[in-house]
Image: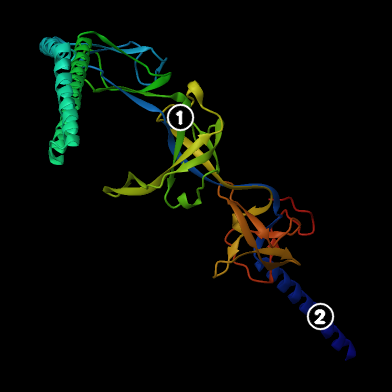
Amino acid sequence: MKKKIFLLFILICIFAGIFYIRRHFMEVKKRPLVEIILPEKGRIMSKITAEGNVEAQNVVRIDAPMSGKIQLSKDVKVGSMVKRGEAMVLITPDEESIKIIRESLDEMEEDLRISQRKYGLSKESYESVQEEKCLEINLEKAKRKYELAKGLYELGVIAYQELEAEKINLLREENSTKKQKQDTLASLEIERLNIIKKENTTKRLKEQLITKEVSAKFDGVITKVNVKNDEIVVKGYELITLANPEELIPILQIPGENIGKIQVGQKAVIKKEYYSTEEFSGRIEGISMVSEEEKGSVEGGYYGYQTEKDYFKVMVRLDKAIGNDLPFGINKRIYGEIILEEKDNAIKVPFNVIHYEDDGKPYLFLYKNKMAKKQAITLGTRSEEDEYVEVVKGVNLNEKIISGVNLELKENQKVKVSKGEKENENIIPH
């Protein structure tokens, strides 16, 4: 009997062991499969990428100095370089213009001769001794009469009122003489200035009859040619736009939702192409306060629809002048990166290990004792390009972090490490 009871006990233990082992393996099999990584320490950078173009700050519009027919220099074309003083355009007056100018010139020269004769006579009259003598005689006469009146008043022959009347007469004569001289001088000056004006007009008319050479005002690059050979233009018409290549400024277009992150003084990198290895470093020098709109179209179904996106212009001052090599080209498309923040010895982890509470606070799961342990953290700089984020507080370099796709873990939940990784060995950082 005792032997049967003992055998039964042994069978029960065997079945219990098998059940426990099977249950254990089933439990292990059901555990979430995770990867384990270690935080990294190194450089992390947050930046904004944007497109833009190169604009010339010193742009000069060169207008036609006279009306006439255009003849361009053979080297004048958009993008070509010109030296200061180099001839770009010749303007020759056309037959119709010559006819009008000659008629105007003949009339102006005749008018000038009349004005010169009139001025000469007026000046001669003013400077004549006879007229000067007449003024002096009248003034002396008034002075003598006043002196005589003073003597008669002292002798009691005339009343005080008569003396005052002679004094007033003397003052009137002095003022009249002075005014007459001033009026004559003013009239002469007006006539002289009128002659100078007519002489200048005559000179300009004569210049209109001569072929005029339009030259570059400085060493520059032609950004616009608004005329062609044999075209007839009027005075003041825009011929050419010239830009100084030493003052080229990259202008980036920053979307409105990102403009609040941009500040004057931030580092920037400019490239000719998006994947270009040649870079030009600089800093943000100015931010436009005016929002601009960029329209585009999106195709969908049978009809397309228009989209509008606002952006702000941001000016970048390069550390080194571009110079005459023009690696970008005026008005050409460029690509830029604005460095918002960068750190050299930051502790960083991939985006996919970060979770968020309902109130937005970040956390991650650490791997401890084969379980997932929730750890609150504080985040810092975020690198969108590398998909890494800095952890300012909450983890150190030696802690094992649980990583995986679409994981829904709970606190103290047991997890299974993916094949090829052993929780007790040193883990290579992700």
Please say if 352 is above or below 28: above
Instruction: Name the disc covering residue 112, or none.
Output: none
Where's residue 171, x and y in %? 18, 32
| Residue ranking furthest to the right | 2
Q: Between 407 and 171, which is closer to the camera in this rendering?
A: 171
Q: Secondary structure at mark 2?
A: helix
Please give left or right for residue 66 compared with residue 410 in the image.
left
Colour mapping: rainbow
Please say if 29 is above or below 304: below
Total numbered circles = 2
Q: Between 356 and 214, which is closer to the camera in this rendering?
A: 214
Residue 234 visible, this angle = no
Local packing at callout 2 (Cα closer than 10 Å; few below 14, some 14-19, many 20+) is few
Local packing at callout 1 (Cα closer than 10 Å; few below 14, some 14-19, many 20+) is many
Please give left or right for residue 184 compared with residue 300 in the image.
left
Which of disc 2 and disc 1 is earlier in sequence?
2
Callout 2 amino acid: Cys
CA separation, marks 1 and 2?
A: 88 Å
Residue under circle 2? 13
Quarter where residue 73 is shown = top left
Quarter where residue 282 is shown = top right
Q: Between 38 and 119, which is closer to the camera in this rendering?
A: 119
Where's residue 59, x and y in %? 38, 27
Q: Secondary structure at mark 1?
A: strand
Q: Between 192 and 152, which is closer to the camera in this rendering?
A: 152
Quarter where residue 159 is shown = top left
User: Which of labels 1 and 2 is toward the front?
Assistant: 1
- Quadrant showing the N terminus: bottom right
Residue under circle 1? 248
